Amino acid sequence: MFVLKNFLMRFPFQNATKESLVAFAMLLPSLIFLTAFTYWPILRSLYFSFHDVMLGSDKIFFLGWENYERVLTDSLFWKSFRNTAFYTLITIPLAIVCALLLAVALDTKIRGVALYRSAFFYPVMIPSVAAGMVWVFLYAPGYGPINGMMDALGLPKLEWLYSSEWALPAIMVMSIWKYSGYFMLILLAALQLVPRDLYEAAKLDGVSTWHQLVHITVPLISPTIYFVVIIGILHSYQIFDYVFVMTQGGPADSTNVLTLYIYQNAFQYQDIGFASTVANMLLVFIGILIALIAATLGRRVHYLGR
Amino acid sequence: MKPSFLKKYGLHAILLPAALLWIGPLLWILVTSVKTRVEVFDASSGLFPQNFIWDNYPAAMSVAPFGTYMMNSFLVTGGILVCQIVTISLAAYAFARLTFPFKNLIFSLFLLQIMFPIYAIFLTNFLTVRELGLMNSLPAMIVPFVASGYGTFMLRQAFRQVPTELSDAAKLDGCGHLSTLWHVYLPLVRPTLIAFAIISIVTHWNDYMWPLLVTNSESVRTLPIGLGLLAKSDSGADWTRLMAATVIVISPLLLLFVIFQRRFVDSFMHAGLK
């Protein structure tokens, strides 16, 4: 008895174990749902990508790397991949630049700041399906107001969503309208923490507004810009909604993106194995993108910001 | 330093047109919803209708069960929020205040969920939900969102700001972990909870892809799905009715936004910081 007690005294794990048990009990509800709806689907998608699986069938055949070979030689996959990359790599930076300019302009004491903020932010409140639908109307070649404006400005009318050249840019313009206000708000929060006297000093030294923006503001809020870039990339998944509502991937697959291509393979061709393979490629793409940003932007952020 | 007048008005000269451009689509929805069908297709009729036609609203209400859709949206969004508050409070408390093995590893597993939203893993989740027999039910639209890595992260940051003296005092008074969480921590982080709630509500009220995949009957559809179906069924034929339906769908959140503007703005502003 004494030996046991001595043993327990020397390793005070009794208390620690109890605390661990409490902790795991508190984590359990989250972990159950994370396992069922995040980890398990990822593992399963990995498993399916090496098999021939059809929707609604119980039969599974091992294929090895065949699905991946098919993906890499599939021209429609590459087209969707290019469209996804093009959309993400152009829309997010443009929206962030737009948001940064708006945030800097609204980080002043001009009249109607609150009204301006709301005007730029409200698209975030609108469901993607409603936004997509309204922009279909706005882009309508015959009677849509955008072509009306183009006409009034003496510019050529375009077919927009009916043109394989302009459909994806049209969706990108809509996305910038939808997300800039959100990014603007996050950047505004960061701007408000920048000490005012820095600008006063710069102004006294005759530093131009543009140089203030590039050399003072941007470096000081770089951690937040980094955060916004990541948020932006994760939001770019939502292009599925827009493409689904506005173009169904057309015309001639010019707006087909990876998420829609997964959907088509799974629910139109019932090919779960191949769809899972495309899904894994999408995860790899996003993963590489985020890793690249963390390695470049993320590193600079720590150096400059802190 | 006082700003020069040129600079003051120069800013408005840029911001005002930009703001009008941004409000344009909303204005277009509202104006079209009170137009006649003839006016929509007639470019010469101008921006505003000759008479305000309110008939489009009853027409939109009668063509689809928007009352049912709204109720479903309400139940799904509310259900997700209630479940999330429970799971993230418990998990955030454990991460902020308890020591246990593999803490950092488990925390990064939680953050992993932020990287893999439903858009990336909808296919295998669809199969899971079908195997669970949840297809075409309200729970199908709730279960993937019950746990929230983002919410856990937000709340953990807030819990860490709570002075440990307070929880020590609660412990001396005989409070266990659960009652400390309930009586000390949750009341103190109310701003963070509200911020998270607003973001969660906006996200899930507007969800489109996932409810689209797991529902196939009127009785369980949510507002965005109903609107999408209506748009598909009369593609471009009846913009006035469709825009009236759009106003019905977007107005609950926009009204809340107008009323609680500061709260909404603050929530989205500080969501990622601290």
Image (cartoon, coloured by chain):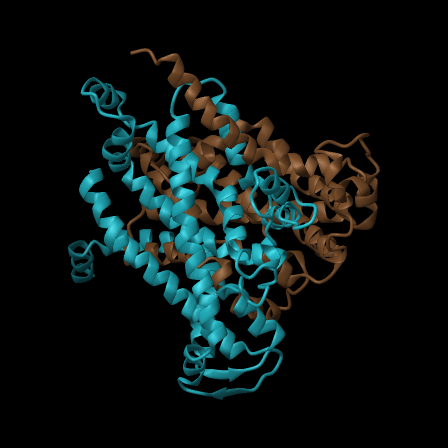
Residue at 78% x, 44% y: name it: B241
Residue at 62% x, 45% y: name it: A147
Residue at 40% x, 27% y: name it: A105
Q: Is residue A9 above or below residue A199?
A: below
> Horizontally, is B105 left or right of B80 in the view?
left
Res B253 visible = no
Question: Where residue B206 sits in the image (x, y, percent)?
Answer: 59, 47
Question: Where residue B150 sits in the image (x, y, percent)?
Answer: 42, 48
Res B11 visible = yes
Please identify the residue farthest to the front as the structure is shown.
A154
Number of marks in picture: 0
Question: Where residue B195 sits in the image (x, y, percent)?
Answer: 47, 36
Question: Where does the N terminus of chain B fall, quadrant-wise?
Answer: top left
Residue at 42% x, 23% y: name it: B11
Q: Nearer the viewer, residue B57 or B11?
A: B11
Question: Where residue B268 sits in the image (x, y, percent)?
Answer: 46, 37
Colour of chain A in the image: cyan
Please identify the residue farthest to the top as the structure is shown.
B2
Question: Where does the C terminus of chain B fall, quadrant-wise?
Answer: top left
Colour of chain B in the image: brown
Q: Nearer the viewer, residue B159 or B50?
A: B50
